[in-house]
Image (tube, grey):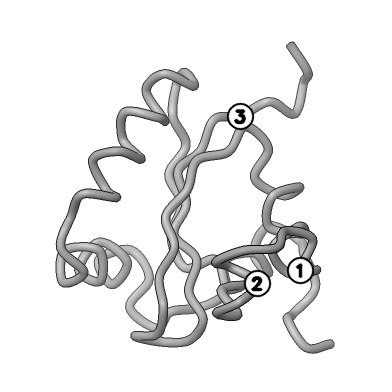
Amino acid sequence: MHADFQPCDTITASARYGTLYSSVTSHLIQRICQHQGGSFDGFTKRYGVKTLVWFERAGTMHAAITREKQIKNWQRKWKIELIEAANPDWRDLAEELGLPRLGG
């Protein structure tokens, strides 16, 4: 297993109260860079979902996938409450992980 392997659940957003996307990854920084760079065709690229507004590390990939399935089944209101409990200003948490600010 790679040293940078860390199962995480994430929620990214197009803007505050904008389009939300929940996902799971084993490499958070790499995944955020891919979203910010538009590397994936599909939902996140189409709707401009690039801002990391919430993430949670998990002990195992199985636990992360289980949590992702739970969050994906939640009402939008619950996802917003989860984000705002930890990140009330909807800051781009990727910046706190050392990634550059979106847009420059």
Check disc 1: other Cα within 10 Å, few if <14, some if 14-19, many if 20+: some
Q: Is residue 102 above or below residue 60?
A: below
Determine the CA span between mark 1 and mark 2: 6 Å
Q: Which mark is residue 87?
A: none
Q: Is residue 92 above or below residue 63?
A: below
Q: Earlier in the sequence, mark 1 or mark 2?
A: 1
Q: Residue 73 at what x, y percent from top left?
A: 21, 49
Please name the residue that numbered disc 2 is placed on: 45
From the viewer's perspective, tell me whether residue 70 is left or right of residue 36. left
For the N terminus, the quadrant is top right
Q: Residue 6, located in which quarter of the rendered image?
A: top right
Residue carrying label 3? 6
Q: Amino acid at mark 1?
A: Gly
Q: Residues within 10 Å of mark 3 (few under 14, many from 20)?
A: some
Sequence-wise, the earlier of marks 1 and 3 is 3
Q: CB under 8 Å between callouts 1 and 2? A: yes
Q: Which residue is mark 1?
A: 38
Percent across and percent down for residue 35 are 69, 63
Say whether residue 85 is left or right of residue 56.
Answer: left
Q: Quadrant of residue 48?
A: bottom right
Task: Of the two numbered discs 2 and 3 on the same chain, state the one appearing first in sequence.
Answer: 3
CA distance for labels 2 and 3: 24 Å
For the point 50% across and 66% down, which residue is it?
12
Tell me what residue is drawn at x 41 percent, y 87 percent: 16
Outermost top residue: 1
